[in-house]
């Protein structure tokens, strides 16, 4: 019997090639896009979970009261890890790391920069690393050892076993390759190319040996012993800092699941409020919505051809076929089409997944070897087939033999209503996506065009490395003389990235507890204001004409307001352990998140902290020409290091990556949802035209024009789109209000967005429906009225 069902289904597919192609194609595209989104969601939910000890790994987090709020961060001091190992027997291992950064690796006459992480050797025991050469037990026992990933080793040495070979780090420190490990999966926190020991970085930077409890610049990870209840341990470790550093007793600690941090890393007042999970859930919603849209399209196109199969159903029922057998037959056809669509969706995924990966800047892989993934895909396909075929099967099997054999299928009103509801659902989803995409880009443009307090265009950032720190002034002078730049400055970091703050700062008239408020800080030398074109409110920049500037600071307006200085110039502020004089006040500039209010900031003259070079390009010279000059001068002063730079405005735009990704994906899936919805609308128009062909014939006989018939057939769909717009707009208002509430600064919800969306929806609707409406209007009434 099942074989017969398959034969009948195949014959119907061949007989109605156009509709079969549209049906299978629409379902295949919907399934492919949904599966790609689900692969992305799978990748995000599996972040860091490949580690064998994943359920016992935790990151040490810190809560710090600040000006009536609680700030949560993951930066910890160096002595914390050994103290926790000593004080809490529940902890099996701890590991300290610095934030990885690119470092120069020299081998023979070859030099390149690779991302390098410094960490305790225990990190190899805590996290899962797959060793290709060498062993975990001896990989970091020697201070002069370096562990490379496969890609890092290949970049330096090419193919082969590099263990035992010696490289130079930063052209200074000879290190022997002790092991090679496989590159971690892309959904891993650790994606370094080289790993060195904590002892090695301490030997390089001697200040780390004396770094105490007040320097919060490092990460600490712990692995608990089996069976330890983390909530109980959190109560014990909470006041660890207070015990060792009473001056910062307000800082409290807690352990946070290592595998949860990627998705749930946003805290407000010490409480987790989500994070990346919000975007992942949105993409999961998109995947489900697009799949349902494809299913609705399948239902509409299937029932649109109902009259062609009405007599078949009537004959089968007349000779004794039960309704259940008919339902089973139509469901079998639906499942067959679903699995054919699944096959084609795999081809679409194979072609488009690399494009999608590049689009979202995440390398996604189909989990071919995962049996559960295949079972899930097959399950989703079967579910899709059952859902998509349920309504057509029940609808077609409900025909009454006597009526259908007389040519009377069923009343139009009783059949169109559920189909109208499906189309309304489709277009409501499409309306939601259209409106959301517009508002997301409106928000991005609003923030991007908001004044940030400095001129980010024409600025170039470079790493302060090698001999550049000592020879910067010579480099700057030559670059200015050559006309490549108008100025340049040494800073602790790019003005785009706020990665440092300090507390324990004291000023005249300070209230109790205000010395515990973290204040953003940037270390600079000279030429800061002119290079960045920061607006000077009063005072001056640091200058070689004032030797006392080694103990000088510049405040932004937010810091002046915090310190309540009516006349800030000349005020003495205790900063970094010494009395510093305020020599200038600058306007607030966006340093951290552009979505949040500007925080108080101190710009201090500190030579030893510089790690970034910013150059203001000459606007009167072509950018490529200026960069070529800068490169030649750079090679003169720092020949061992490659010339690498990045435009500051590009780095600033990186702040909007998440929102831009959300907007780009919304636009892509909006277009897809519109296409699939139009196919469903096409199906409904086709069905309606078939049901009303006699009515149209009578109208034409009575003198109705083509325009009148077109208008009569189209107006009901315009009403459907209008209802969909109202439903979609209401849902959008609810969701967008919630999304924008997370930003301090956000765009307005403008009326023109809704008007444009409504007009766009109507145009799409009329273009989709018109082909069927005009085709029906042009038909010869003789054919439709012949049986009368």
Image (cartoon, helix red, strand yellow):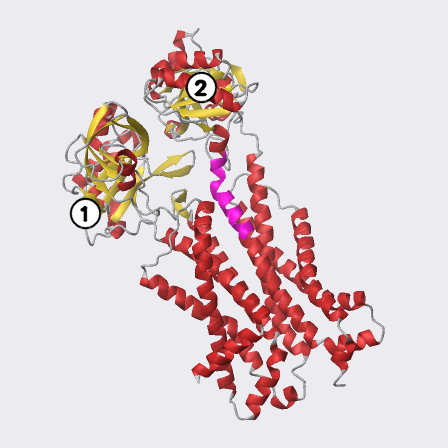
Q: Is residue 467 visible?
A: yes
Determine crowd level at label 1: few under 14, some 14-19, many 20+ residues with C-alpha closer than 10 A. some
Give the residue displayed 73% in from the left and 70% down from the top: 776
Mark 2 = which residue?
630
Seen in the picture, residue 52 relative to 178 is either above or below; the reply is: below
Which x, y percent locates residue 425?
Answer: 59, 64
Answer whether residue 84 is magenta in the image: no
Determine crowd level at label 2: few under 14, some 14-19, many 20+ residues with C-alpha closer than 10 A. many
Q: Looking at the magenta stretch, what is its main secondary structure?
A: helix
Answer whether residue 666 is magenta in the image: yes
Give the residue displayed 47% in from the left and 81% down from the top: 5
Query: Rounded to the nearest whole Å, what is the CA distance between mark 1 and mark 2?
Result: 55 Å
Q: What is the residue that sits farthest to the bottom in this orientation?
A: 319
The label nearer to you, 1 versus 2, is 2
Mark 1 = which residue?
90
Q: Is residue 327 left or right of residue 700?
A: left
Q: Which residues are magenta?
A: 653-668
Q: Earlier in the sequence, mark 1 or mark 2?
A: 1
């Amino acid at each position: 019997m099942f074989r017969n069902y398959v034969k009948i289904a195949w014959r119907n597919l061949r007989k109605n090639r156009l509709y079969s192609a549209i049906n299978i194609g629409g379902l295949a595209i919907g399934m492919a896009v949904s599966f790609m989104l689900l692969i992305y969601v799978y990748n995000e939910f599996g972040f860091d979970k490949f580690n064998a000890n994943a359920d016992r790994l935790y990151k040490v987090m810190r809560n710090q009261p600040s000006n009536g709020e609680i700030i949560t961060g993951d930066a910890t001091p160096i002595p914390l890890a050994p103290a926790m190992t000593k004080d809490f027997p529940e902890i099996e291992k701890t590991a300290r790391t610095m934030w990885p950064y690119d470092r120069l690796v020299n081998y023979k006459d070859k030099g390149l920069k690779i991302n390098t992480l410094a960490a305790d050797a225990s990190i190899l025991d805590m996290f899962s690393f797959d060793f290709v050469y060498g062993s975990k037990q001896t990989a970091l026992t020697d201070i002069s050892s370096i562990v490379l990933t496969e890609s890092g080793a290949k970049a330096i040495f090419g193919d082969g076993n590099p263990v035992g070979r010696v490289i130079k780090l930063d052209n200074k420190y000879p290190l022997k390759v002790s092991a090679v490990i496989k590159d971690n999966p892309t959904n891993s926190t650790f994606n370094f190319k080289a790993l060195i020991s904590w002892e090695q970085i301490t030997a390089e930077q001697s200040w780390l040996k004396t770094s105490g409890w007040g320097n919060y610049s490092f990460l600490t990870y712990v692995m608990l012993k089996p069976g330890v209840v983390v909530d109980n341990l959190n109560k014990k470790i909470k006041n660890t800092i207070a015990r060792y550093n009473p001056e910062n007793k307000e800082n409290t600690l807690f352990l946070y699941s290592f595998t949860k941090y990627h998705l749930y890393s946003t805290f407000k007042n010490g409480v987790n409020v989500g994070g990346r999970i919000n975007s992942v859930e949105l993409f999961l919603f998109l995947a489900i919505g697009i799949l349902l849209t494809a299913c609705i399209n399948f239902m509409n196109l299937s029932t649109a051809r109902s009259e062609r199969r009405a007599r078949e159903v009537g004959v089968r029922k007349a000779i004794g076929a039960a309704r259940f057998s008919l339902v089973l037959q139509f469901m079998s056809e639906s499942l067959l089409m679903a699995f054919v669509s699944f096959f084609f969706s795999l081809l679409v995924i194979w072609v488009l997944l690399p494009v999608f990966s590049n689009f979202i800047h995440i390398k996604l892989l189909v989990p071919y070897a995962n049996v559960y993934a295949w079972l899930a895909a097959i399950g989703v396909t079967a579910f899709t087939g059952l859902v998509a075929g349920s309504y057509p099967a029940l609808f077609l099997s409900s025909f009454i033999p006597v009526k259908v054999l007389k040519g009377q299928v069923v009343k139009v009103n009783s059949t169109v209503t559920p189909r109208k509801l499906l189309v309304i659902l489709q277009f409501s989803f499409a309306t939601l996506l259209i409106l959301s995409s517009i508002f997301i880009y409106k928000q991005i443009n609003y923030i991007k065009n908001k004044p940030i307090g400095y001129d980010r265009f024409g600025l170039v950032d470079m790493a302060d490395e090698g001999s550049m720190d000592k020879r910067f002034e010579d480099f700057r002078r030559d670059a200015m003389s050559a006309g490549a730049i108008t100025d340049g400055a040494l800073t602790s970091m790019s003005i785009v990235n706020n990665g440092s703050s300090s507390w324990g700062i004291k000023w005249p008239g300070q209230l109790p507890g205000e010395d515990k408020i973290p204040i953003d800080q940037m270390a600079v030398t000279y030429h800061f204001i002119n290079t960045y074109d920061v607006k000077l409110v009063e005072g001056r920049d640091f200058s070689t004409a004032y030797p006392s500037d080694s103990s000088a600071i510049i405040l932004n307006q937010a810091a002046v307001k915090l310190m309540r200085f009516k006349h800030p110039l000349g005020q003495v502020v205790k900063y970094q352990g010494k009395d510093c004089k305020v020599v200038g006040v600058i306007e607030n500039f966006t340093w951290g998140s552009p979505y949040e209010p500007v925080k108080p900031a101190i710009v201090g003259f500190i030579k030893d902290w510089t790690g970034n070079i910013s150059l203001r390009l000459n606007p009167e010279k072509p950018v490529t020409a200026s960069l070529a000059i800068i490169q030649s001068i750079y090679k003169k002063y720092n020949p061992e290091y490659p010339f690498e730079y990045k435009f500051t405005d590009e780095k600033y735009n990186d702040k909007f990556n998440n929102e831009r990704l959300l907007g780009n994906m919304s636009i892509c899936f909006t277009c897809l949802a519109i296409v699939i919805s139009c196919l469903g609308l096409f199906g409904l128009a086709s069905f309606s035209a078939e049901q009303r062909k006699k009515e149209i014939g009578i109208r034409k006989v009575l003198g109705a024009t083509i325009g009148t018939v077109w208008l009569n057939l189209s107006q009901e769909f315009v009403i459907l789109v209008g209802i969909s717009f109202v439903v979609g707009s209401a849902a959008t208002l609810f969701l967008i209000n919630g999304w924008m509430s997370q930003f301090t600064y956000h765009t307005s919800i403008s009326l023109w967005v809704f008007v444009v969306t409504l007009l766009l929806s109507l145009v799409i609707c009329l273009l989709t429906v018109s082909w069927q409406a005009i085709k029906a209007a042009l038909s010869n009434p003789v054919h439709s009225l012949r049986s009368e």
